[in-house]
Amino acid sequence: MAARLEIAITTSDIGARVTTRRRVPGGFSDAVGVLESWDGGTLTVRKRDGSLVEISEEHLVAAKVVPPRPGRT
């Protein structure tokens, strides 16, 4: 069974934790973090290490909102 790639986020999800998959030379790359902005065709995701990932809409192949990161026990 093949995986179904779907972009299931919108600008209304800014502030939510998301997972994204984008095309890069040689394959795909994933980023999980908080969707900080989506402006001018570019999404910005802040990863848990604080780094920002900018993703062009034209390279985005899948994305969805995911639950908040589990807390430490």
Image (cartoon, grey):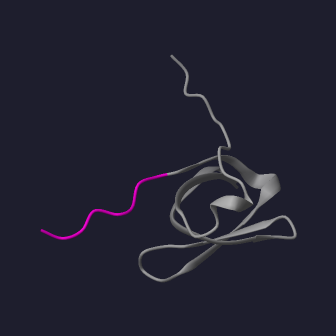
Residue depicted at x 71% and y 54%: 10
Task: Relative to 52, say whether 45 is above or below.
Answer: above
* Left or right for 41, reference 1: right
* Left or right for 53, reference 72: right
Extreme-front residue of the structure:
12
* Left or right for 34, reference 69: right
Residue depicted at x 64% and y 67%: 14
Q: Position of residue 21 (x, y in %)?
A: 60, 51
Q: Position of residue 43 (x, y in %)?
A: 72, 67
Q: Position of residue 40 (x, y in %)?
A: 87, 70
Whether the magenta-drawn stretch holds residue 26 is answered as: no
Residue depicted at x 49% and y 73%: 47
Whether the magenta-drawn stretch holds residue 72 is answered as: yes
Residue depicted at x 82% and y 53%: 58
Task: Relative to 50, say whether 73 is above or below.
Answer: above
Q: Quadrant of residue 68?
A: bottom left
Extreme-left residue of the structure:
73
Task: Relative to 15, say whether 64 is above or below.
Answer: above
Q: Position of residue 9 (x, y in %)?
A: 66, 51
Q: How many marks?
A: 0
Classify the position of the C terminus by image quarter: bottom left
Q: Which secondary structure dominates the residues rendered in magenta?
A: loop
The span picked out in magenta is 66-73
